Image (tube, helix red, strand yellow):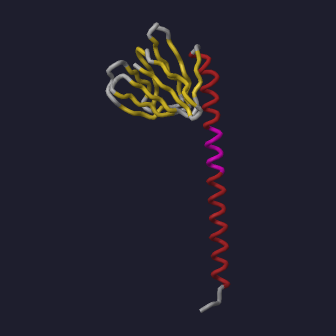
Amino acid sequence: MKLSITTPMGIVVDNETVLSLKAEDKTGSFGIMPGHADFITVLDISVISWQGENGKMNYCAVCKGLLSVTKGREILIATREAVIGTDLESLKSSTLVKYYFDEEQEEKTRVSQEIMQAEAIKNIQKYLLQETRFDTSP
C-alpha cells in the first residue's frame, strides 16, 4: 500500500511499500491491510504505526488529523503536526505529551476569548438599554 502523511508544511511520509498500518480515532485503534474498504475517519492525537516491506515498524506522532483509505491500496493522512520517530515509547512520552499540552492551552485560550466576547456583548446591551431610557424622541 502507499502511505502519505502531510502537514501544512509539506510531506512528512511518502512510502509505497506499507504492509499494514495501525491508527486511532475516537472509537479506538484500528488496523488497515491491503484491500481494506474505502473509508475516512478523524484521528485523535496518537501515534500511527506501520510495517514496511522489510518488516521494520515505523512510527509517526500526529496531532489529530484526517485519514482516508482509497481503493484498498492508498492511505492518506492530513494532520496539523507530525513527528517521525523510531522509538514508540519516546514518541508517546515526549511528542504526544506536547500535543496534549498544546491542546489544553488552546482550549483555555478559546474559553477566555468566549468569556471576553460574552462580556463585550453584555456591555453593549447595557449601553443600548441606557440609550433607550434617555431617548425622549416620539
Residue, x 63% and y 76% (percent of image)?
129
Residue, x 36% and y 31% (percent of image)?
39
Q: Residue furthest bottom?
A: 138
Whether residue 107 appears in magenta in the rendering, the answer is yes
Percent position of residue 138, x then y: 59, 92
Percent position of residue 113, x then y: 64, 52
Residue, x 46% and y 13% (percent of image)?
51
- Magenta part of the chain: 104-112
Q: Where the N terminus falls, by quadrant? A: top left
Comparing 104 with 17, the one in front is: 17
- Residue 32 appears in which quarter of the rendering? top left
Comparing 15 with 30, the one in front is: 15
Q: Label the magenta part by its dominant secondary structure.
A: helix
Whether residue 98 appears in magenta in the rendering, the answer is no
Comparing 125 with 48, the one in front is: 48
Q: Determine whether, in the image, residue 73 is placed left or right of residue 118.
A: left
Percent position of residue 36, x then y: 33, 23
- Residue 7 appears in which quarter of the rendering? top right
Q: Determine whether, in the image, residue 66 is placed left or right of residue 37.
A: right
Q: Name above or below for residue 87 compared with residue 83.
A: above
Comparing 119 with 11, the one in front is: 11
Q: Name above or below for residue 52 compared with residue 113.
A: above
